[in-house]
Amino acid sequence: MSEKKLLVLARRDHAEAMRVAAGLTIFGHAVSLIFMDHPVEESAENAANAELLELTGIEPRTTVAAMADDLPLLDADGLARACTEADAVLSL
């Protein structure tokens, strides 16, 4: 099986999106994660999931201006480019 470029859009459930993104790396795929809609809530669950992202080498990006101090901020063109460059897009 060849490596695929997978993009996870964290729209409604950031915690689940982080778990899914980290889990997809098991199959050897290149996985990207983009936080959307609202800032990630500070919670023990999200902190643990952020550690999973770090362990798997996923460097998330965001479309949420309030998160721009912590993560690379994508504008509409950047988001569109990320979606078109991916082999598959998952929205959670």
Image (spheres, grey):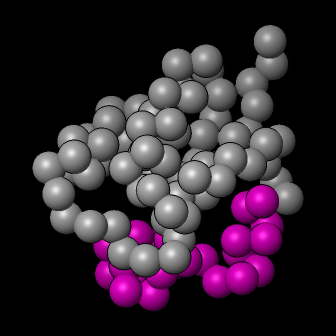
Tell which residue pokes out farthest to the top in this image. 1
Quadrant of the rendering where the N terminus is positioned: top right
Task: Compare residues 76 and 12 and report the one nearer the observer.
Answer: 12
In this orientation, does residue 57 appear?
no
In this orientation, does residue 35 appear?
yes
Asked if residue 47 is positioned above or below residue 25 in the image, the reply reads below
Q: Does residue 45 appear to the left or right of 36 in the view shown?
A: left
Tell which residue pokes out farthest to the front in this image. 12
Tell which residue pokes out farthest to the bottom in this image. 65
Residue 11 is situated, as x and y percent measured from the top left of the image, at 54, 64
For the record, the magenta segment spans: 61-83
Residue 9 is situated, as x and y percent measured from the top left of the image, at 60, 57
Q: Is residue 9 magenta?
A: no
Task: Compare residues 54 and 39 and report the one nearer the observer.
Answer: 39
Residue 27 is situated, as x and y percent measured from the top left of the image, at 61, 18
Identified at 27% across, 67% down, the residue is: 41
Asked if residue 46 is positioned above or below residue 80 in the image, the reply reads above
Identified at 73% across, 61% down, the residue is: 82
Identified at 53% across, 71% down, the residue is: 36
Q: How many marks?
A: 0
Residue 57 is situated, as x and y percent measured from the top left of the image, at 43, 38
Asked if residue 54 is positioned above or below residue 29 in the image, the reply reads below
Asked if residue 88 is positioned above or below residue 60 in the image, the reply reads above
Identified at 76% across, 31% down, the residue is: 4
Rendered image quadrant of residue 39: bottom left
Q: Is residue 63 magenta?
A: yes
Tell which residue pokes out farthest to the left in this image. 44
